[in-house]
Image (tube, grey):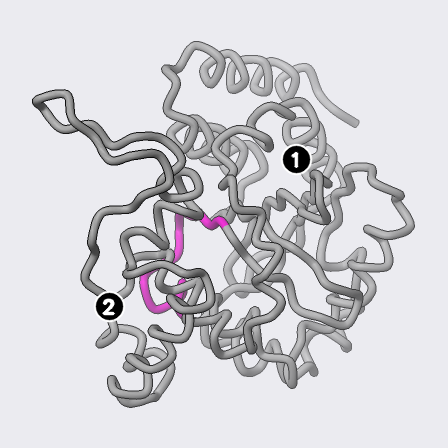
């Protein structure tokens, strides 16, 4: 049952977001911070992902979060592409998405997998337990071209599961901000991301987060030389010359779809990126 206090809190939150400026990432952060408070979550993630099939891991092309430190973010990226230790809820969640036929769905961890199946899984032992993260609410909003805008609200290990009321609150809020799912989404929908190997997808995700080669090497247990080769492979795949244009392509547009003007009024021709050192 949704209480009067819940309705008032949702109206205040959506009102606060509505009167903000045009900075879409800031609006998303304000919305998610308020929603996390509303359902008493410890952390949140908002991603835009592509799914290739029920047995495949999601392929993130846009990512923002609060409540996780750098090590946690790295482990989240790594775990999302570990095909040998997929989350036990991966297949049932995809079945739910397919069965919904393009409708928005919201599910808790206990809707998707039993306690035994969750806590005995290699995924939980390898990733969730070290992260200290357990229960979740996932709210998945279908978009065009096989893409999904997905919100995850998380609680630390030792806390109770999200209940039906909290799941409903998350569903209502995420359902009623359709324009935020479409706004600030990269113009490149990531159609070629599935062509990357799982390891390159992990490096791709960390590059979008602004990680350096040194950081990635430490997180993935690889040499910086190996990371350098992986990084070059990602750049070649997307036909960019460095980390900055890669981020621009997936975070603020296709990279160079509009002229870049200099103070004297000159600019690069549309679609012609300036020279960029590979990094």
Task: Identify the element where label 1 is drawn.
Answer: helix
The image quadrant where one finds the C terminus is bottom left
Q: Above or below — where is 19 with respect to 210?
A: above
Q: Choose the circle earlier in sequence order: 1 or 2.
A: 1
Q: Which residue is mark 2?
A: 212
**Image-based side of 103 in relation to 32, left or right:** right
Give, as a single range, the part of the protein colored magenta: 62-74
Out of 160 and 50, give the one closest to the viewer.
50
Q: Quadrant of residue 14?
A: top right
* Residue at the image point whose x is 27% and y is 53% from the top: 244
Q: Above or below — where is 39 with respect to 194?
A: above
**Image-based side of 164 in relation to 230, left or right:** right
* Residue 221, position as x, y percentages in the image: 35, 88
Residue 69 counted in the magenta span: yes
**Image-based side of 270 in relation to 93, left or right:** left
* Residue at the image point whose x is 40% and y is 33% from the top: 25
Mark whose residue sits in front, 1 or 2: 2
Out of 46 and 50, give the one closest to the viewer.
50
Out of 195 and 172, give the one closest to the viewer.
195
Q: Which residue is mark 1?
A: 170
Q: CA distance from mark 1 to mark 2?
A: 34 Å
Task: Identify the element where label 2 is drawn.
Answer: loop
At label 1, counting other C-alpha atoms closer than 10 Å, the crowd grade (few under 14, some 14-19, many 20 or more) is: many
Q: Quadrant of residue 248?
A: top left
For residue 241, say whether it is visible: yes
Residue 113 counted in the magenta span: no
* Residue at the image point whose x is 37% and y is 44% from the top: 255
């Amino acid at each position: 049952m949704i209480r009067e206090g819940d309705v008032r809190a949702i109206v205040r939150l959506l009102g606060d977001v509505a009167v903000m400026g045009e900075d879409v990432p800031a609006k998303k952060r304000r919305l998610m911070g308020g929603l996390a408070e509303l359902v008493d979550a410890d952390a949140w993630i908002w991603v835009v992902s592509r799914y290739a099939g029920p047995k495949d891991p999601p392929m993130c092309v846009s990512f923002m979060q609060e409540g996780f430190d750098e090590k946690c973010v790295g482990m989240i990226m790594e775990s999302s592409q570990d095909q040998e230790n997929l989350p036990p809820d991966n297949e049932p969640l995809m079945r739910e998405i397919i069965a919904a036929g393009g409708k928005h769905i919201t599910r808790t961890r206990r809707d998707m997998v039993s306690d035994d199946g969750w806590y005995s899984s290699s995924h939980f032992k390898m990733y969730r337990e070290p992260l200290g993260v357990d229960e979740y609410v996932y709210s998945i909003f279908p978009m065009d071209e096989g893409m999904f805008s997905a919100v995850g609200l998380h609680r630390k290990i030792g806390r109770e599961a999200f209940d039906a009321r909290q799941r409903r609150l998350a569903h209502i809020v995420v359902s009623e901000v359709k324009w935020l799912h479409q706004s600030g989404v990269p113009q490149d929908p990531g159609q070629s991301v599935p062509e990357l190997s799982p390891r390159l997808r992990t490096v791709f995700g960390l590059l979008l987060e602004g990680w350096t080669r040194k950081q990635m090497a430490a997180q993935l247990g690889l040499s910086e030389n190996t990371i350098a080769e992986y990084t070059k492979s990602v750049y070649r795949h997307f036909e960019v010359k460095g980390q900055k244009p890669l981020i621009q392509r997936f975070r603020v547009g296709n990279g160079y779809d509009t002229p870049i003007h200099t103070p004297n009024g000159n600019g690069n021709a549309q679609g012609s990126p300036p020279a960029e050192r590979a990094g």
